[in-house]
């Protein structure tokens, strides 16, 4: 149940109960023992405030001044402790929650736009296909921005030996989304170049047990610090060739510029050698690329038009071939440089043996084909066939989820893509990738949104949304966003949403208010009323009477309000003293007079007005005010909702009015009415169920005397 993540049996989906090893922190407080007490409180960010207190003993008579000076220390100190040793699991959970919350606006916006397009098509408005594509592209870019790694501010001074950057632990999800985005949310014309960019970012994720170009460059980067003559190292030239094979031109040029021939203090004449290195670097940096633009810092010449690209490609390959057959190679005396540079030329000329030798994973060889052998866009069937050939040439021991998604996309198998997303990257990936998989492909859309009997009449799309929503609902930090996904499920979503909101604990006030807001948002009035009834009863039973009455009124629960009114009436009826009435007066005011006469609230409201008028009489001593109080008294006595046990207390409170000095306030008929009520009380005393008012005999005699005196005065005034 939401709000109780510590009980796996109550969760909609089970979660891991594995407890990580505790992290120890050293608190350097500088106090001499013993420490009497320690207080710990959260501060800003990931800081803790730890207060350490000493017990200050009273100095004894035998202690000298020196010992007292030794103990002259502060009574305590407050130390800040920074929590830096977060476990990997906690960091991963926090990252997952950030992604879950960040993707809700994009998902909700896309659903709203899709519903608007469907409504427009039903109303015979023109719904452009391009508009739908734009919505999908906007959604994909928002998710990509959410998953994008926040890079730290770049240093002003660039490290010349920094070749590749480390890959974070939270990069795999971004890599998976990148593959889906390339093939389903972007133009098919730039797919090969997009794969080159994708591999440059995520090559290190392809395998953890087998080498990759990225891992080779990381190893080379560690060696660069200690290498004195870098061009003599075989790993240096192998790293350059591997980077060129996968299209990392900026890294290739950067490594070439580290060549020793660029150093000014050379003992030998290395001008020819340096010229060859620089020529190869210029050829690499001017390599034609069939793409609209390049990211900042990347090298190459961009061509948007295929015919222009073909001309530039043939011209560039001609320059590479011309350099390969140049006579300057015989003048280069450094063997490693000569062989290394000529190997780079063979790669640029597209020799398959070199590409196969200098790549380590089949995706790297696959990308190398697009760069140097077949740089033109092909269909999915040809791309899938090429991928199978690369797999045969570069078989892998195991395939990661990224490889599975890529093969599923190339094979045009939506089920495989969705299965890999769900199994390897979780429900979040499956739910949001479906939005891309189902757009623009009728077969995929039918497969994902067709109602299936074996799934209980729901579609695969709705099934994955329900699974993800239940996963969110099982955690106290994410249940608030589960309704967004449940509301998008037309078959079973609203039913599960009602169950989710009904199961929320009403004792947590913020959770309760959030649940009411969700009920209002999704027009679940019945659930909202039931929750307010439950909250009202809960607060009433736990002593928060006013709070309970408020929520029962909001729920329009007349039955329970009437029962509460009856309880108030019974409590006040036991003793109608001023103290007992003041205790319940606020609740009576809160209940109002619309509950009905079933609970006697009509009498209690009239009695409240009568007590207010008595106070006014004591303050103003005006005959008109006193007359109004008397009229209120008569109405109370005549009202059938006023029980008999209240008659004597009411008359006793009105003795001052009955003995008004200026003139009698009661007429003869009104006085006879009150005397008749006293006679009825005398007869009612004979019944066994009579409830005595508790007044003393002197008070009762005072009431009789006041009524008799008022009767005589009123008769005389009438004559």
Image (tube, helix red, strand yellow):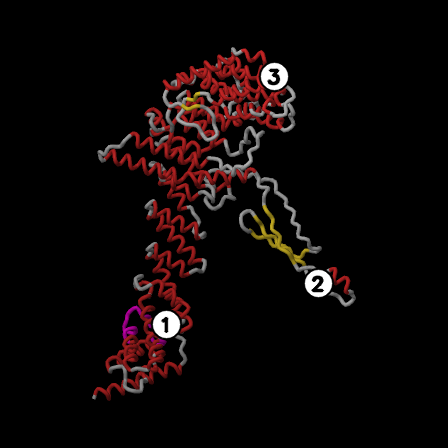
Between the C-alphas of marks 3 and 1, the distance is 119 Å
Q: Which residue is mark 3?
A: 336
194 above or below 679?
Answer: above
684 above or below 128?
Answer: below
Residue sitting at x 33%, y 63%: 592
Residue sitting at x 25%, y 79%: 670
Q: Is residue 645 magenta?
A: yes
| Residue 380 visible (yes or no) | no
440 above or below 2?
Answer: above
Of 683 and 249, nearer the camera is 249
Of 438 and 252, nearer the camera is 252
Residue 448: give x, y in percent of width and height: 36, 28
Residue 604: give x, y in percent of width and height: 34, 68
Query: Are the residues tagged 3 and 2 within 8 Å (C-beta)?
Result: no
Q: Which residue is mark 1?
A: 690
Q: Which residue is mark 2?
A: 57
- Helix, strand or loop under label 3: helix
């Amino acid at each position: 149940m939401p709000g109780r993540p510590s009980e796996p049996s109550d969760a909609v989906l089970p979660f891991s109960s594995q407890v990580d090893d505790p992290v120890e922190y050293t608190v350097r407080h500088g106090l001499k023992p013993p420490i009497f007490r320690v207080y710990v409180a959260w501060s800003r960010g990931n800081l803790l405030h730890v207060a350490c207190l000493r017990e200050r003993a009273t100095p004894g008579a035998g202690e000298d001044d020196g010992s007292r000076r030794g103990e002259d220390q502060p009574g305590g100190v407050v130390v800040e402790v920074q929590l830096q040793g977060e476990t990997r699991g906690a960091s991963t959970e926090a990252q997952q929650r950030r992604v879950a919350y960040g993707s809700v606006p994009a998902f909700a916006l896309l659903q709203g736009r899709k519903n608007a397009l469907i409504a427009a098509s039903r109303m015979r408005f023109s719904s452009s296909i391009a508009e739908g594509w734009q919505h999908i592209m906007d959604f994909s870019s928002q998710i990509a921005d959410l998953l994008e790694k926040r890079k730290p501010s770049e240093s002003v001074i660039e490290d010349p030996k920094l070749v590749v950057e480390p890959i974070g632990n939270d990069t795999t999800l971004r890599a998976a989304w990148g593959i889906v985005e390339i093939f389903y949310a972007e133009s098919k014309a730039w797919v090969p170049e997009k794969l080159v960019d994708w591999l440059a970012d995520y090559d290190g994720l392809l395998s953890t047990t087998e080498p990759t170009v990225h891992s080779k460059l990381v190893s080379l980067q560690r060696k660069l610090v200690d290498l004195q003559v870098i061009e003599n190292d075989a790993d240096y030239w192998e790293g350059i060739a591997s980077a060129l094979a996968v299209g990392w031109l900026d890294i290739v040029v950067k490594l070439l510029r580290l060549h020793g021939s660029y150093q000014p203090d050379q003992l030998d004449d290395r001008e020819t050698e340096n010229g060859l290195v620089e020529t190869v670097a210029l050829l690499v940096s001017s390599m034609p690329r069939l793409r609209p633009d390049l990211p900042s810092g990347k090298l190459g010449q961009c061509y948007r038009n295929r015919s222009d690209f073909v001309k530039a490609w043939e011209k560039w390959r001609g320059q590479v071939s011309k350099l390969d057959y140049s006579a300057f190679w015989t003048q280069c005396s450094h063997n490693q440089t000569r062989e290394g540079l000529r190997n780079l030329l063979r790669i640029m000329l597209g020799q398959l043996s070199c590409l196969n030798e200098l790549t380590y994973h089949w995706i790297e060889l696959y990308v190398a084909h697009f760069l140097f052998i077949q740089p033109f866009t092909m269909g999915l069937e040809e791309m899938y066939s090429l991928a199978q050939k690369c797999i045969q040439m570069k078989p892998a021991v195991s395939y990661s989820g990224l490889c599975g998604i890529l093969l599923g996309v190339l094979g045009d198998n939506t089920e495989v893509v969705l299965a890999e997303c769900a199994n390897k990257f979780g429900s979040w990936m499956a739910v949001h990738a479906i939005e891309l998989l189902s757009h623009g492909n009728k077969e995929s859309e039918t497969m994902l949104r067709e109602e299936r009997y074996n799934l209980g009449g729901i579609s695969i799309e709705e099934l994955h949304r329900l699974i993800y929503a239940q996963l969110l609902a099982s955690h106290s930090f994410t249940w608030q966003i589960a309704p967004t996904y449940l509301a998008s499920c037309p078959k079973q979503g609203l039913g599960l949403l009602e169950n989710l909101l009904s199961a929320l604990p009403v004792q947590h006030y913020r959770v309760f208010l959030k649940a009411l807001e969700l009920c209002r948002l999704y027009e679940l009035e019945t659930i909202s009323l039931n929750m307010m009834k439950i909250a009202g009863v809960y607060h009433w039973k736990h002593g928060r009477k006013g709070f309970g009455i408020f929520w029962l009124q909001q729920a329009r629960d007349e039955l329970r309000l009437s029962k509460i009114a009856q309880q108030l009436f019974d409590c006040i009826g036991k003793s109608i003293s001023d103290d007992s009435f003041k205790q319940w007066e606020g609740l009576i005011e809160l209940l109002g007079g619309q509950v009905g006469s079933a609970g006697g609230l009509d009498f209690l409201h009239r009695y409240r007005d009568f007590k207010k008028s008595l106070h006014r009489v004591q303050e103003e001593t005006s005959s008109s005010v006193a007359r109004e109080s008397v009229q209120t008294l008569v109405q109370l006595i005549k009202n059938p909702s006023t029980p008999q046990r209240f008659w004597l207390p009411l008359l006793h409170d009105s003795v001052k009015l009955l003995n008004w000095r200026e003139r009698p306030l009661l007429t003869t008929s009104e006085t006879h009415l009150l005397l008749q009520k006293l006679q009825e009380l005398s007869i009612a005393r004979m019944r066994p169920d009579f409830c005595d008012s508790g007044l003393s005999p002197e008070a009762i005699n005072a009431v009789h005397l006041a009524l008799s005196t008022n009767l005589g005065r009123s008769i005389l005034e009438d004559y």
